[in-house]
Amino acid sequence: MNKIKVVNDIIVLEEINKNIEVKFENKNDSFNVNNITLKIKESCDIEITYEALEKTKLDMYFYVYPNVSVNIFEVRSGVKTKVQYKYYIEENSSVTVNKFYYNTKHRELDIVNLNGEFSRFDYYLKTIAKDKEKYDFIINHNKSNTISNIYHHGINNSDEKLTFNVTGVVPKNKIGCELEQQSRIITNKDNENTIAPNLLIDEEDVSANHAALIGNFDNEEIFYMMSRSISYEDAKILLTNGFLLSGLREDNKEKIKNILDTVWG
């Protein structure tokens, strides 16, 4: 397991093996942004923890070599964070990303480039929004026979806006690609939220689907649980936890469960 911790502008390589190469560049005068580059040469697991105790900006670059399988687990907490991710994935490689966020104000841009044939990207973002959050996600299927599965799930209990913009791109003559997008926001208040699913496809030989849903949990689910002697508050917590844990790797679920216990008190 490779473990990286980032606190404000300080990166700590807690456990790094030969599978990856990590490079850190301090803020430059022009953009005031730190850069972290990871070159992933062999199959491995990576765990990244972010703690932003003050306003921060960060660019993350992931270069995944051919024939590599990578599992990335990220936990992010803090205030007023801005981050840009760029992924470059070569042939016959697969990347699975599990993210769990509980920030106060966050803006993020993810750009994924599937640059090799038979490359794959599976992405699960789970966020508890405490303030305004915006996520822009773009995945480019630059080669034929590439696969992407993109899931954005958010709980918004704040008075501010939560936004998911998800765009899948397939150019002409890139055949056999598969794209799946599912975005959902659970809100308990009369706040404004936005999901914009976009499929920009210039090729017929493609399988592409998207779904978007904003609203609360189904009342029938809550009433059913209450009929089993579960209180209304506990029913909401159970449904929320299930929503936030769905789709994640089993080993990551246990870590997030421990965090949720502290979040809900």
Image (tube, grey):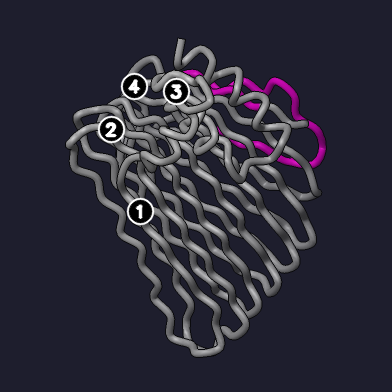
Identified by mark 3, the residue type is Ser
Q: Which residue is mark 1?
A: 213
Q: Mark 1 vs mark 2: which is more N-terminal?
A: 2
Name the residue at the front extreme. Answer: 227
Left or right of 229 in this view: 255: right
Tell me where the magenta segment starts and ends, as one range.
4-24
Q: Is residue 7 magenta?
A: yes
Q: At x 48% / y 46%, what residue is drawn?
A: 85
State the CA–CA distance, disc 3 to disc 2: 22 Å
State the CA–CA distance, disc 4 to disc 1: 27 Å
Q: At x 45% / y 48%, what residue is drawn?
A: 152
Instruction: Tell me if mark 2 has few (under 14), some (14-19) or many (20+) residues whose alpha carbon lies within 10 angstroms of its own.
Output: few
Q: Secondary structure at mark 2?
A: loop
Q: Which residue is mark 4?
A: 79
- Whether residue 165 appears in this view of the structure is yes
State the CA–CA distance, disc 1 to disc 3: 25 Å
Question: Which mark lies nearer to you, 1 or 3?
Answer: 1
Q: Mark 4 vs mark 1: which is more N-terminal?
A: 4
Q: Secondary structure at mark 3?
A: strand
Q: Which residue is mark 3?
A: 77
Q: At x 29% / y 46%, what residue is drawn?
A: 163
Left or right of 183 in this view: 105: left
Question: Which mark lies nearer to you, 2 or 4?
Answer: 2
Instruction: Tell me if mark 1 has few (under 14), some (14-19) or many (20+) residues whose alpha carbon lies within 10 angstroms of its own.
Output: few
Left or right of 37 in this view: 56: left
Identified by mark 1, the residue type is Leu
For the residue pair 170 and 221, the one nearer the viewer reads as 221
Q: Which residue is mark 2?
A: 188
